[in-house]
Image (cartoon, rainbow, N blue to C red):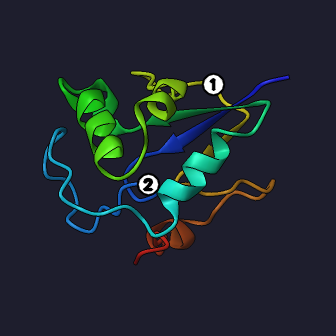
Amino acid sequence: MTRPICIDFDGVIHGYQSRWQGATNLPDPPVPGAIEWLQQLLTEDGIAPMIYSSRSKEPGGIDAMRAWLLLHGLTFAQLEQLHFPTQKPSAFLTIDDRAWCFTGKFPTAEQIRNFRTWQQ
């Protein structure tokens, strides 16, 4: 059984220290270890990585992410194994730096206000 994995681009793969600079402007380096992790994930049977971002629906956004991944170490063959949906896909697992892991308890308003990404 193949498990689709939705991986957020900014803050998970792309360092995103410069924040939003437009859909096609990717000025930051990768999150340390992100490229190697993605390359390893691509060798695993039963896992179908999908890269998704708010860039995905913007003109040139997917092309910019693909070019950035090539620039930072993915091969063309590896890039061809990745999926780049234009809408948030159904997935077995989503990896995102801006998400709350729901454990059956809803976050309080204070927890929502105080949420920080791993980089903050």
In this figure, what is the number of numbered marks?
2
* Position of residue 66 in the picture relative to residue 111 (left or right): left
Q: Nearer the viewer, residue 44 or 52?
A: 44
Q: Nearer the viewer, residue 42 or 118?
A: 42
Q: Amino acid at mark 2?
A: Ile
Q: Is residue 98 visible?
A: no
Q: Is residue 2 visible?
A: yes
**Where does residue 28 sit, x and y in percent of width and height?**
24, 62
**Where does residue 38 sit, x and y in percent of width and height?**
56, 48
Query: Would you identify the image quadrant in which residue 16 lies?
Result: bottom left
**Where does residue 76 sit, x and y in percent of width and height?**
41, 31
Q: Secondary structure at mark 2?
A: loop
Q: Which mark sits nearer the N-terminus, 1 or 2?
A: 2
Query: Would you identify the image quadrant in which residue 15 lies?
Result: bottom left
Query: Would you identify the image quadrant in which residue 37 lies?
Result: bottom right
Image height of 65 relative to 21, above or below: above
* Position of residue 38 in the picture relative to residue 27 (left or right): right
In the rendered structure, find residue 90 and report the number of the disc placed on it. Answer: 1
Q: Nearer the viewer, residue 112 or 32?
A: 32
Q: Residue at x 86, y 22 (%)?
A: 1
Image height of 43 relative to 1, above or below: below
Which of pointers 1 and 2 indicates the residue nearer the eye?
2
State the residue position of label 2.
Answer: 13
